[in-house]
Amino acid sequence: MIVRIEGLLSGEQLEAIRDRLDTAAWADGRLTAGHQSAQVKANLQLPQSDAAAREAGEIVVQALEANALFVSATLPRHVYPPLFNRYEPGMTFGAHVDNAVRQIPGMHYRLRTDVSATLFLSAPEEYDGGELVIDDLYGSHSVKLAAGDLIAYPASSLHRVQAVTRGARDAAFFWIQSMVRDAGSRSLLYDLDSSIRELTVRGADAGSLLRLTGCYHNLLRRWADL
């Protein structure tokens, strides 16, 4: 399941993050890549110890926690602290699959990567190229979103970032361990929750909505891993 979340960041939040990134010290992105990814990765990244990266990450997490669509689509149990990358002309990230498990810096806890997320921080007109391409059973999906929009997709997906040919593409990226491990079950719950929301807006029968809501929570109770 691929889900686009429009306007995750407010204009004020986006400006605050970009101000921090503009003064940060970027490093070679391969420093945090695994063996396979390092062979196809050519970009810049903020070290996780960088104060600007931590401050920007806190803004992103606050926005995620307040976004009902993000919660519905991913059912987050844990969110990996957001990372930040930059692609300048000639930079790209070839086809790869994200690591199944990530160690959270400074902690003994390991996170299972069920869902990957990319939050676009540069406006599309600021750069050429730089599309995120996600492959699934239905083909390849090319993604280039407005600044402040997020795309969430299965971490098991083969994906890549096309070469930037003009300007610079800044983004935040991170992973989510969902309360519901199985992607199919997670998709069913998302569809059910979306339908309940739509029917509520349309003024559907209260008793029917109550039964649907009960089904949703009973399925979540059955599938949730806490």
Image (spheres, rainbow, N blue to C red):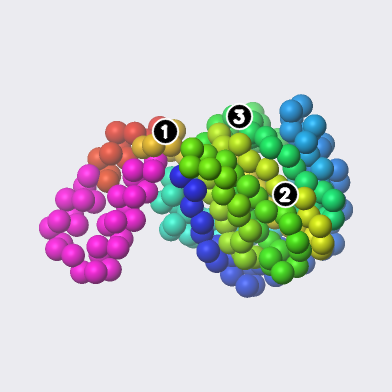
Q: Is residue 115 visible?
A: no
Mark 1, secondary structure of its residue: loop
**In this figure, which residue is indicated by the disc labeled 2?**
162
The residue drawn where x is 49% and y is 48% is 2
Residue 220 locus on image (x, y percent): 32, 40
Q: How many marks?
A: 3
* Residue at numbered disc 1: 182
Q: Residue at x 60, y 52 (%)?
A: 142
Judging depth in this view, the residue of 145 and 180 nearest the camera is: 145
The disc labelled 1 sits on which kind of residue?
Asp
Question: Where is residue 41 drawn, in percent x and y?
Answer: 78, 39
Q: Gap in Å between the C-alphas at discs 1 and 3?
A: 15 Å
Instruction: Give the spatial CA distance, label 3 vs label 2.
Output: 25 Å
Callout 3, which amino acid?
Val
- For this orientation, the residue located farthest to the bottom is 11
| Rendered position, 190 above or below 154 | below
- State the residue in front, 169 or 136: 136
Q: Are marks 3 and 2 in contact (CB under 8 Å)?
A: no
Q: Secondary structure at mark 2?
A: loop
Q: Which segment is the magenta one?
A: 186-215
| Residue drawn 85% across the image and 51% down it | 90
Badge 1 crowding class, 10 Å Cα cut-off, few under 14, some 14 to 19, many 20 or more, is: few
**Mark 2 crowdedness (10 Å alpha carbons): few <14, some 14-19, many ≥20:** many
Tags 1 and 2 touching, CB below 8 Å: no
| Left or right of 111 on screen, residue 128 | right
Local crowd size for mark 3, using a 10 Å CA cut-off: few (<14), some (14–19), many (≥20): few
Q: Quadrant of residue 199?
A: bottom left
Q: Tell me if 211 is positioned left or right of 155 in this view.
A: left
Circle 3 is placed at which residue position? 101
Q: Is residue 142 magenta?
A: no
